[in-house]
Image: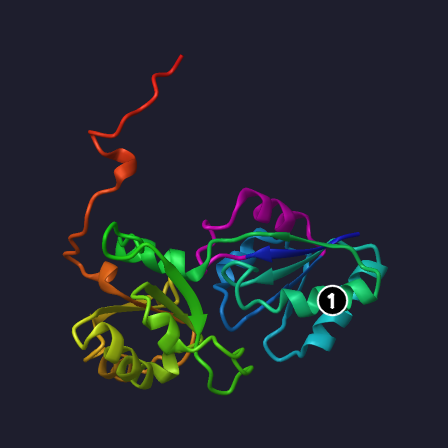
Amino acid sequence: MTVHFVGAGPGAADLLTLRAVRLLEAADVCLYAGTYLDAAVLGHCRDDARLIDTQHLDLDEITAHLVRAHADGLEVVRLCSGDPSLYSAVHEQARRLDAAHVPWDVTPGVPAYAAAAAILGAELTVPELAQSVVLTRAQARSTVMPPGEKLAAFAATGATLALHLAVTRTRELAAELAGHYGDGCPVAVVSKATQPDELVLRGTLADIGDQVEAAGLRQAAVILVGPALAPDVRGGESFLYAAGRERRARG
């Protein structure tokens, strides 16, 4: 049997891929991160499926459940919040499964930053304002950031920033970023995107810290920073769709 790492998306039960839903419906065992997932996502599992909340387990304990399910010939899904390609610890878990000779695969999901942008009705790449998106995180009680991956270096590009695992340091990060983007740079914080208790805060680098602290946000939030986040943003227009662009006739 194969261990399936499945992106659960931002939280809404109807934002999973068709493949993800099919895998959940077939799963005998489902491991999920209870801290981040809306319980409605688990509604895709069978009533007799064994559900294991991993929020209090370490990687070795999680892997032990995966290996045991495989040995028992059971279909097993490891749900990851958002998309498995970002901050999901898939690499560490897959390495352990390889050592145990357990096959695995990955099904992508809607990443949290994309869900946040959709809720805001924002395009993160607006012509002539921002054509790059930097996905990064803050460091507090977490793994050390690699040399060279400094927030100031990313901010110097003027790109749209999507900050994960950073909401507890919003005030500190806003002060640092203001030196590059200016105090009036638009910021949005989206907590628990698409879930019933979703919260959206919009402001600037000058006031977003106050808003986050007043809301008492501590986790499950994405911070988006950059001129493309302005509610009344006005940028250029895409050359791809320009009326004057030469187009090849379809033959």
- Residue 92, magenta (yes or no): no
Report if residue 66 is visible in the image.
yes
For mark 1, give the secondary structure.
helix
In the figure, is residue 43 to the left or right of 112?
Answer: right
Q: Which residue is mark 1?
A: 95
Residue 168 pos. (x, y %): 38, 83
Q: Give 117 or 179, whichever is nearer the viewer.
A: 179
- Image quadrant where residue 135 sits: bottom left
Find the magenta span and give its range.
8-28
Query: In the figure, 48 relative to 92: above or below?
Result: above
Q: Give 165 or 145, whichever is nearer the viewer.
A: 145
Label 1 environment density (alpha carbons within 10 Å; few <14, some 14–19, many ≥20): few
Residue 33 pos. (x, y %): 57, 69
- Residue 23, magenta (yes or no): yes
Q: Give 237 or 162, whichever is nearer the viewer.
A: 237
Query: In the figure, 40 relative to 152: above or below?
Result: above
